[in-house]
Amino acid sequence: MQKNIPRVCLTLTSPTLSENVSLVKKYSAYIDLVELRVDYLNESEQNFVRRFPAMIPFPCILTIRRKNDGGNFYGNEMSRTILFSRALAFANQDRKKNFAYVDFEEEYQVPSLQEAALSFGTKIIRSVHDMKNPIKNLQARFSDMHAKPNEILKIACMPHTLSDITEMFAEAKTLHGFDYILCAMGNLGIPSRILAQKTNSFLTYTSPKETEENLSSVRHLDPETLETVFHFKSLNDETKIFAVTGFPLTKTSNPFLHNELYKRHKKNAIMIPLASTSIEESLAFANELGISGMAITVPYKEKVLPYVQNASDEVKKIEATNTIVKTDAGFFAYNTDAFGFEKALLEFLQTNNLRKTRIAIIGAGGAAKAVAFVIKKLHGNACIFNRTLSKAQELAKKYRFYFAELSPVSLETLQKFSNVIIQTTNVGMNANTESNEETDPIYFYNFRGTEKIFDLIYTPKKTALMKKAENAGCKISNGFTMLRYQAEKQAELFQGIKNE
Ligand code: NAP
């Protein structure tokens, strides 16, 4: 049986009612209802809460969350009850002008308020929160709540590991016959918000970008991203789910690139970010959700290899994978970083091989492994520079390249291998400043203007190293084209999408 599409709820935490109204207007194309968090309103505004439902064209949840439950209300229970009664009083004949829902915590049992809510057509959401721990045995926990008929039950909790989320999805399959809301908080909980359709949650909460800091530990997505990047309203039982997994995975561009491709090619498919503290847990989640392909990122590109049944020749040689695809025999590993890098580099250099080219590879981490493989394949002559010399040595040995320490003592060697400089360390990531020891791994090098610089970093668009090189007249490229090409290849492996 096809499930309902969960509603998208915009949680409002601005200090004034009018600011909240503006945010509702801004996100109106993406939402079905709103939650007014009275606990975030200025005290003077709290007196006018009763007017709010009539100020917006959406059903509204009334919530006054206490500090202990993750909210911002510091008053006592008496003053909270007074606020609730003011907000629910003077019912309007036109139900749209009353609160459509009110959120009462499990133990908040005030019969007069409950009766008032029900007689005015306001539905009760009966909620349980654990801001520190996961909540297990959902079925038993829900029945312990002794809810009245027609109450919507809500569980919100903080997972410790991805296994807690996997359990949540598994247990949700056993819940039937009543309306409930399930949400897991924090970065680990993001799949529970995007895939609310899979848990059959009554709604999924979102926050405006403008106020996301207010609920930063909760980690709401904004409703525009939920719809335009994750196609929330189009997800159904047939949607193929893919994931990018890593840790901490606070930022990843892969879902943006993949989901845009799936949309453009009319595929009922979605890629979600899957933060996980172990690759074993990522694989268990994939198994529970029927995920047939994953992009693998730091720190699992090598750690996943014992769990794959077969691998491409590139993966065998590079000894790292960034893509696994489920087959009848188990997972097959590919390395589309190598593919993406080769295509982007050749385009940048406008050539098809690197014969007679002297190349500096800066770094000897995971990305450098794919880079070195490609440089060898294209017949380049390289020297690998790394902070940890042993790692440079190990990688260089594999391809019969030179190696050197990444420091001013290697300046002369760097000058010799400077036709093309490929930057693969994470130094310079997210740093939008000038070249110095902290922001540029080769800060000690002065460009002649003839070098070609390919930096694998794509945020910022121009690293300190790239800026310095460009100022000296060098041709430069960041890592975005590589990222795009590796994602396109993954989409081909996952969904057969051929890119021209
Ligand atoms: P990794 O395996 O953790 O390797 C990190 C590398 O950076 C190592 O060589 C490390 O040297 C070096 N490093 C780190 N901090 C340093 C410092 N303060 N000074 C000098 N060297 C330092 O990471 P990775 O997977 O290779 O990723 C590296 C970068 O490539 C990231 O910025 C990532 O976003 C980018 N990347 C881009 C793409 C793309 O498609 N454009 C694909 C993959 C990766 P030690 O060995 O001494 O620790």
Image (spheres, rainbow, N blue to C red):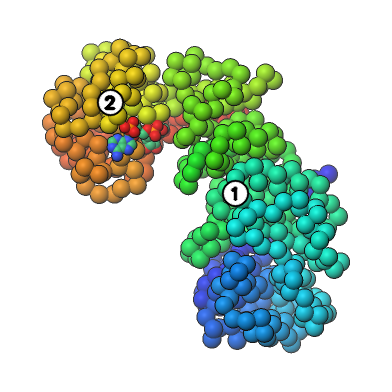
User: Would residue 51 be seen by someone viewing this image from the given angle?
Assistant: no
Residue type, mark 2 in image: Leu
* Label annotation for residue 30: none
Along the viewing direction, whichever of 162 and 266 lies nearer the viewer: 162
* Residue on which the image places disc 2: 389
The residue lying at 59 percent from left, 49 percent from top is: 160
Identify the image quadrant of residue 458: top left
Q: Tell me the quarter of the image containing the N terminus.
A: top right
Label whose residue precedes the other's in the sequence (2 or 1)? 1
Place of residue 258 in the rendered image (x, y in percent of width and height, measured from the top left): 54, 37
Answer left or right for 278 relative to 139.
Answer: left
Instruction: Say whether mark 2 is within 8 Å of ligand 1.
Output: no
Place of residue 169 in the rendered image (x, y in percent of width and height, measured from the top left): 71, 45
The residue lying at 62 percent from left, 47 percent from top is: 191
* Residue on which the image places disc 1: 160
Answer left or right for 41 relative to 93.
Answer: left
Q: CA distance from mark 2 to mark 1?
A: 37 Å
Residue type, mark 1 in image: His
The residue lying at 17 percent from left, 23 percent from top is: 413
Quick one: SS at disc 1?
loop
Ligand 1: image quarter: top left
The residue lying at 36 percent from left, 14 percent from top is: 398
Along the viewing direction, whichever of 473 and 99 lies nearer the viewer: 99
